[in-house]
Amino acid sequence: MKIKIIGLVLLISLPLLANAAVPDFASYTDVKQKKAAFFDYMYPLILAENKKILAERNIVKSATASPELTKICERYSKDCGTIDDKKIKALLKRVDVIPPSIALAQGANESSWGTSRFARKASNFFGQWCYKKGCGIVPARREAGTKHEVRKFSNPQRSVGAYIFNLNTGRVYAGLRNIRVDFRTKSKKPNGYELAKGLNKY
């Protein structure tokens, strides 16, 4: 499938991306071809999720009271009864893009280039866990007494969206968000290499 990308504008609909057939990455015998196929497949999904986040960010930046702003606030934060300047600032720290380089690198590492059991059976490319029985796949080597499962997604794009949301809201990834804010404050584009320094807890 050919996808033309101009900046962050994808000339393909999001539903089509979500429903596109996932390549059989394990079938590749040439390592370079497998890696290229993985990046070619995942990159548009990451850009599509970032595009949605940028749309949310623009709503937050407008600071105009609206049902859309309240919905975004409730998704990323708490106490959204009054959305003042302080709340807007806090939201902008969370509602922001993740450099594709980070997502591609972590996706490749966590899914063994799309060949892991969790990637194939659960569309989970980032090793995300869940804690409700039946929410995913039970790891073969899960320690006795633990209850986590590897979360199951309906398609890889939802896995990408959940991964980015996790980085944008998880307490242990505050370091990444602080680095990103520093870039924004200096009017610089967030750098994947530098932001990765905030992922020591991943």
Image (cartoon, grey):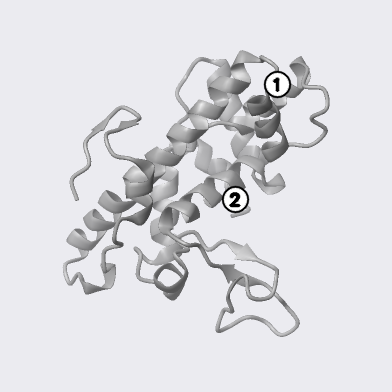
Q: What crowding class fits label 2: few (fewer than 14 Cα within 10 Å), some (14-19), or many (20 or more)?
A: few
In front: 69, or 85? 69
Q: Image quadrant of residue 111?
A: bottom left
Give left or right: position of 37 versus 112.
Answer: left
Report the number of numbered marks: 2
Q: Is 26 placed left or right of 50 in the picture?
A: left
* Residue 190 in sight in this render: yes
76 with respect to 184 (left or right)? right
Compared with residue 103, is residue 148 higher up or lower down, i.e. above or below? below
List x then y, in percent, for residue 47. Answer: 38, 38
Task: Locate residue 4, reporting x and y percent.
Answer: 21, 36
Residue at 60% x, 48% y is 166
Looking at the rendering, which quadrant does residue 145 occupy? Answer: bottom right
Q: Residue at x 42, y 60 (%)?
A: 109
Counting residues from the N terminus, which is met first, the one under dot 1 or under dot 2? 1
Seen from this angle, which residue lies furthest front?
67
- Looking at the picture, which amino acid does disc 2 mark? Asn
Q: Which residue is mark 2?
A: 200
Residue at which label 1 appears: 88
**Closer to viewer: mark 1 or mark 2:** 1
